[in-house]
Each structure stands twice: as structure tokens, then as C-alpha cells.
Image (tube, helix red, strand yellow):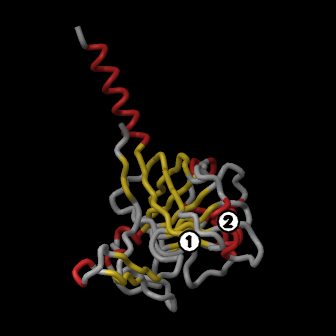
Amino acid sequence: MPLWIDVTVPLHESVAVWPGNPSFNIQRHRMVGFGSLTNDSIITMDVHTGTHVEGLLHIESDAEEPSNWPVDALVMDVIVAYAPDVQVIGPEVIPELLKKSQGILFKTSNSDRNLWDETSFRPDYCALNELAARQMSSNPNLKAVGIDYLSIQSPFHSIDVHKYLLESSIAVIEGLDLRKVAPGPYHMICLPLIIVGAEAVPCRVMLSSMEKEERDKAESESNVQQSP
């Protein structure tokens, strides 16, 4: 049975958000301690809070939204690519192997610096530049690109980063927590919520190491061969 790693950022009132976006808030409107039969809560948040998936509707006024995607649209094999020593992910950072992948998740200095432990937004996070996004948009096999902070593009690059990817039907997964994930190939299960009309939606993302699966399989076959 595969060992799944949850790479979803928990939603809480101190989680960092994009400048100008409302903070995540949860509030009880019914409480057992105050005479209600149940505890019921209301949450308020921007849909780009925490771990979320963006569709083309994010940058176009009349485009497909994630609620229309098949349930298994983001169930795929991906590669976690480690880029620890760069501030910007350009084409030179993307190895040939990644150019043939169905999904790429970038683990960067954002993870090494534990940016998710900080409650304030950090504008100096690592992200893609336009050239890298354009290169990846030319890959017909690529279906998803992810990053380990709030946006696939930095505040210092243009919206073209999003455009190249989303206009090529490449889903953008932002807000991943990859700190406990080693580079390599993984099975990914990413399940976006169905929120009709939303350009982006919160999601739960899990990874299972394909390398560990192969090691476990080889070890199991070796044990069988050694049995009397």
C-alpha cells in the first residue's frame, strides 16, 4: 500500500495571503456551549488562499472553470523538481527529463526557508519567469505545474507566466508544502473542490513516491525468491 504524503497547506487564521486579499477566517455561528445542538462554522477566504488550483477563468472573463474538469483531471504521475539555489526559475533550470513530464511540482528555496511558517507575505519568493512558462507551454504532455508558495509567478514578472500555462490547458497548482518531499517521481492525487463559477478552488494534494514503490516491490520479490 503506497505511503501518501499530504502536501496541502492547512487553512488557519494566520496563514499568509496575497497582499490585499482577505485573511482566512473561521467563526462559530452555533455553539454547543451556548445552547445550540451542534457546532456550526462560517468561513471567509479568497479562493487563492492556501493550496489551490487555477483555471483559465483566472485570466479570461469567459473561460472554463475548474468545476467543469473531470474528477481525475489532476490524478497523474508528476516529478518534484528541486531548484534550491535560484531566485527565479528560468528555462535553464528545467532539465530535459521534465520537458516530457505530465506534471511538474517545483520545490524551491521557498521550502528551504520555511516560508509557510511565516504569517506575513514574502515578496522575495522563488517562482517562474515568462521564458520558463513559455517553454513548458510548448510541451503537449504537460497537464499541471505546481509551486511551493502562493503564486507560480513573482510580483516582479508579468501575467504572461499565467497566460502561457493556462492558455495551454495546463492547470496551475499553487500553495504546495513540499518541505517533506524529496525530489523525484510521484503519483499525485489532487482533488479540487467543486465551486461553480470560481476561477480557482481549494484542493487537497497527496503524493506517493514511485521510487519507494519500486524499492518495496523489488524487496518483496526478493523475499519471495529467498523463501524455502
Asked if marks 2 and 1 touch (Cβ < 8 Å), the reply is: yes
Q: Nearer the viewer, residue 92 or 149?
A: 149
Residue 50: give x, y in percent of width and height: 45, 73
Q: Which residue is mark 1?
A: 152
Q: CA distance from mark 2 to mark 1?
A: 10 Å
Residue 36 can be seen, yes or no:
yes
Task: Say which quarter of the image contains residue 145.
Answer: bottom right
Local SS, label 2: helix
Q: Is residue 115 left or right of residue 129?
A: left
Q: Which residue is mark 2?
A: 165
Residue at the spot x=62%, y=62% of the render? 171
Q: Is residue 80 depicted above or below 66 in this figure?
A: above
Residue at the spot x=27%, y=20% of the render? 223
Disc nearer the start of the sequence (2/1): 1
Residue 2: give x, y in percent of width and height: 37, 40
Residue 180: give x, y in percent of width and height: 33, 58
Q: Identify the amino acid type marked 2.
A: Leu
Q: Is residue 195 left or right of residue 30?
A: right
Residue at the spot x=53%, y=46% of the render? 77
Image quadrant where one finds the N terminus: top left
As drawn, which residue projects farthest toward the bottom? Answer: 20
Local SS, label 1: loop
Image quadrant where one finds the C terminus: top left
